[in-house]
Amino acid sequence: MWGVGLNYVSKAARTGRGLPEQPILYLAASSGVSAPGARVVIPRAATEPDYEGEIAVVVGRRLYRASESEVWPAVAGITAANDMTARDVMRTTGIPALAKSYPGFTPLGPSLRTPDDLADRDAIGVRTWINGELLQDDTSAGMIFPIPDLLSRLSWFAALEPGDVVLTGTPAGTGQDRACFLADGDEVRVEVDGVLPLLTRIVRPSDASPRDHRPTEQVG
């Protein structure tokens, strides 16, 4: 699973950072993926757990040294992702893979939409609601590196294989932007145009096991 940091103009503007000239890429552990409707238990060590609503791209055909025009035909579909981040771990280690790879920290799903079924592949909407409050609202038109550009650039360094997932960045409105992080009982709802909404429930019991991210009933 690949991810990219700072890939929305709105996010760069909110943080006061300039636009990157190259994608800021990282790998995250596939063991962090959790099911739609999962209860994600925050480990005690993560004091600033954050949400990141994103468009996830699922690779359907091998991409290596691909041109932009070859990307969409090789995509199996898009889905919703909540690319959760322990901001305190990111700050202290500087390593995205450590801040994003806790068990359950990458909820995906619950449905796929093929590229041909998208109304506008250049402006796919992504929205995040926390406890019913809309906090992120943007489209892929606001990306610094659009999906074909992003996957093409990546494929010149690493072969993307069927089943690989590329998380394409998050717009402004994260907890980091508001200095307000996820708390026990919070419900995160990520909506991506054309797919079913992704729900995640946050749990911080005092006796929580880090492996306790079992799926619960999907609603909505």
Image: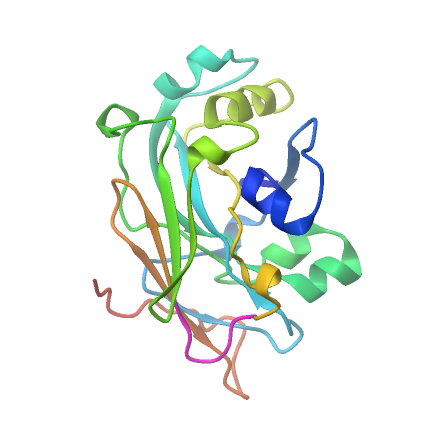
- Residue 100 is situated, as x and y percent measured from the top left of the image, at 60, 55
Q: Observer-nearest residue: 213 or 19? A: 19
101, above or below 8, in the image? below
Q: Nearer the viewer, residue 172 or 33?
A: 172
Q: Main secondary structure of the magenta part?
A: loop
- The quarter in which the C terminus is drawn is bottom left
Which residue in the rendered view is the most extreme toward the bottom? 206
The residue lying at 42 percent from left, 74 percent from top is 186
Above or below residue 67? Residue 213 is below
Residue 2, quarter of picture: top right
**Residue occupying the point 50% across, 70% down:** 211
Per the rendered image, the range of residues in magenta is: 181-187
Q: Nearer the viewer, residue 201 or 176?
A: 176
Residue at the spot 25% in from the left edge and 23% down from the top edge: 116
- In the displayed structure, 112 sits above or below 47; it is above
Q: Position of residue 110 (x, y in %)?
A: 29, 51
Q: Residue at x 55, y 43 (%)?
A: 10
The number of discs equals 0
Q: Is residue 170 above or below residue 74?
A: below
Q: Quadrant of residue 117?
A: top left
Q: Identify which residue, 88 or 179, lies in the foreground.
A: 179
Q: How far from the left and from the top, in percent, is residue 30?
A: 51, 49
Q: Horizontal and vertical percent for residue 49?
A: 58, 67
